[in-house]
Image (cartoon, grey):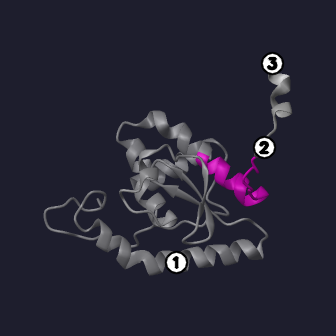
Amino acid sequence: GWVGKAGQYLFINLARIGLNRDGWTIGNAVKCQPQVKGFKPNVLVGTPHELSALEHCTPLLLDDLTQHKDRCANIHKTPVVLALGAVAFRQVMGLAKNNPMMKESYYNYVHWSNKYHIWVISAPHPAYLMRGNHGSLPVLLYAAQRALQVANESFVYDEPNLLLDPDYKAFSHWS
């Protein structure tokens, strides 16, 4: 994966901030390029065959993620996935296309995938950036740095400090 123009764009820009391909596991949510008459090759989003292609490749994705988690355990790193694009994010998170989360801002946040039991950080797909959306490149670069930070340092959600059923004295300092 990531050998075409989008891959070159990705790795050239990662190299500009000092990140190279060493130590990365690279994969795709879809391992094949379905060729369907009447549709552009190498385009999946919004096509009638999008769901069937994703379902067909799910066992391969599971195998990739299992191997990734095993490698991380051997080198004492936290397994994390940098999901590039909405399709990859939905697939790794186990979300339906119409999930309300897909309408929210989900880039650069650290998410937990209950489906695959792995941390997930999402960013725009490089092909999207190459179509004139270069202003979002810093989002992708930050997400890559954040993914490495989680891999090296782990991640724990902050515990909220909630005051349940406070008495009136708890609010006295507000007056």
Whichever of labels 1 and 2 marks the residue nearer the N terminus, that label is 1
Q: Nearer the viewer, residue 16 or 63?
A: 63
- Compared with 16, 121 (above or below) is below
- Compared with 110, 118 (above or below) is below
Q: Residues within 10 Å of mark 3 (few under 14, many from 20)?
A: few
Q: Kindly report the secondary structure that dominates the magenta region of the rendered protein.
A: helix
Is label 1 or label 2 in front? Answer: 2
Q: Amino acid at mark 1?
A: Leu
The residue positioned 54% from the left and 45% from the top of the image is 140
- Compared with 41, 127 (above or below) is above
Is residue 29 on the magenta stretch?
no
Q: Residue 67's quadrant in the figure?
A: bottom right
- Compared with 152, 52 (above or below) is below
Residue denoted by label 1: 62
**Residues at marks 2 and 3, CA–CA distance in whole angstroms:** 18 Å
Asked if residue 60 lies left or right of residue 21, the reply is left
The residue positioned 75% from the left and 66% from the top of the image is 77
Q: Nearer the viewer, residue 131 or 98?
A: 98
Q: Amino acid at mark 2?
A: Leu
The residue positioned 46% from the left and 44% from the top of the image is 104
Q: Residues within 10 Å of mark 1 (few under 14, many from 20)?
A: some
Magenta region: which residues? 143-160
Q: Position of residue 168 (x, y in %)?
A: 81, 32
Residue denoted by label 2: 163
**Residue that extends furthest to the front in the rendered view of this protein:** 168
Q: Position of residue 137 (x, y in %)?
A: 50, 39
Q: Residue 151's quadrant in the figure?
A: bottom right
Residue 112 in view = yes
